[in-house]
Amino acid sequence: MSTRALVVPAALLTAVAVTGCSTHSHRRHHAPVRRSYQTVTVPNVVGMNHQKAQNLMQSRGLRNLAERDATGRGRKLLIDRNWVVVRQIPTPGARVSSGTQVTLYSKKYTD
């Protein structure tokens, strides 16, 4: 009969020692995290390189971005710098919450 030694990393032992093995629940009940949204003006990115358009939107606080192939072929925009924005929703100049989804419709430069 052979016996095997159980090797437990020191970090794991420390974690168990620090957190303990109590049967009591010490959960804290936190209020839900609320995001604060600001009102921003949507920039005009039509005619821009798709990657630069995304960068501009994000710099203005618009981070909820979606992208679509404007040709209707359903292609994925894998290399953003190869695409140009031809349409956007919401329209340029619209005042929206910074949490609003902005959809960029782009096509390849070669289309």
Image (cartoon, helix red, strand yellow):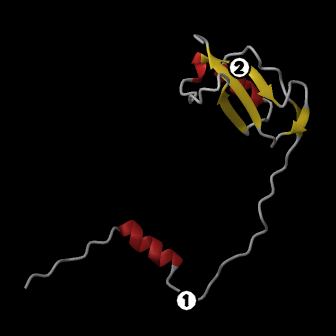
Horizontal arrangement in the rendering, residue 5 relative to residue 98 (left or right): left
Write the residue at 14% across / 82% down.
Answer: 3
Write the residue at 69% across / 35% down.
Answer: 66
Write the residue at 9% across / 81% down.
Answer: 2
Give the mark, 1 or 2, whose residue is nearer the N terminus. 1
- Neighbour class for label 2 at 10 Å: few (<14), some, many (≥20)? many
Q: Nearer the viewer, residue 31 or 22?
A: 31
Q: Nearer the viewer, mark 1 or mark 2?
A: 2
- What label does residue 85 carry, if any? 2
* Residue 79 occupies quadrant: top right
Write the residue at 59% across / 19% down.
Answer: 81
Residue pointed to by mark 1: 23
Q: Give yes or no for contact between labels 1 and 2 (Cβ–Cβ under 8 Å).
A: no
* Residue 68 occupies quadrant: top right
Query: In the rendered view, would you say 22 is above or below 110?
Result: below
Q: Secondary structure at mark 1?
A: loop
Disc 2 residue type (three-letter): Val
Horizontal arrangement in the rendering, residue 26 relative to residue 36 (left or right): left
Residue 30 point in image, percent of width and height: 75, 70
Q: Residue furthest front?
A: 72
* Residue 77 occupies quadrant: top right
Query: In the rendered view, would you say 58 is above or below 98?
Result: above
Give the CA separation, mark 1 to mark 2: 57 Å
Disc 1 residue type (three-letter): Thr
**Which quadrant of the rendered structure holds the C terminus?**
top right
Residue 100 point in image, percent of width and height: 81, 41
Residue 90 point in image, percent of width and height: 84, 31
**Which quadrant of the rendered structure holds the N terminus?**
bottom left
